[in-house]
Amino acid sequence: MPSGLPCAWRPHDVLHLWLGCVCFTLVQPDSPSAPVNVTVRHLKANSAVVSWDVLEDEVVIGLAISQQKKDVRMMRFIQEMNTTTCSCALWDLEEDTEYNVHMQAISIEGQSPASEPLRGWEDGLREQR
């Protein structure tokens, strides 16, 4: 690096910086709409089934689910391809714990925006009796 230049970048460094900036999911104009009617059912002490609907005219080939305990940084990300199923089991949950869960539909054109947050356990996860 030449002396006297406070910030000299090597081409290799610039490439790494550029690649680091483009490694995120882009929502394409033709990508599917966000899943709707996201609900939790079959709630147990440590598991639940999440279900949702997709718009009638959209062809969905996969799903992505992000699950995060409220006020905790770590996130679980589930992605399934080659499926048209509109439900997914969440496991290893903790009772009396609130979670933030978002769904995304995946099509040939790309990934949808995230759904509205899942409703159904605002007061913490409790088994349905």
Image (tube, rainbow, N blue to C red):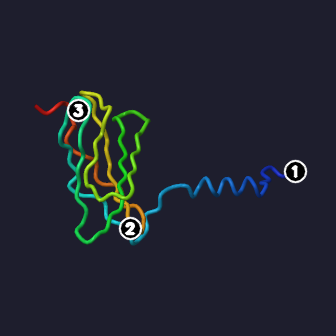
Above or below: residue 125 compared with residue 26: above
Seen at 35% across and 41% down, the residue is 67
Q: Amino acid at mark 1?
A: Gly
Q: Residues within 10 Å of mark 1 (few under 14, many from 20)?
A: few
**Which of the 4 quarters of the picture holds residue 82?**
bottom left
Above or below: residue 126 compared with residue 36: above
- Report whether 4 appears left or right of 127: right
Query: Real-space Cα distance between discs 1 and 2?
Result: 49 Å
Seen at 33% across and 64% down, the residue is 60
Q: Residues within 10 Å of mark 3 (few under 14, many from 20)?
A: many
Task: Name the spot of residue 47 as percent of width and height, x first.
Answer: 26, 35
Q: Which mark is residue 73?
A: none
Q: Looking at the image, which is closer to me, 23 or 17?
A: 23
What residue did someone put label 1 on?
4
Q: Amino acid at mark 3?
A: Leu
Of callouts 3 and 2, the N-terminal one: 2
Circle 1 or circle 2, nearest the eye: 2
Task: Name the spot of residue 50 as percent of width and height, x first.
Answer: 24, 46
What residue did someone put label 3 on?
125
- Report whether 12 appears left or right of 129: right
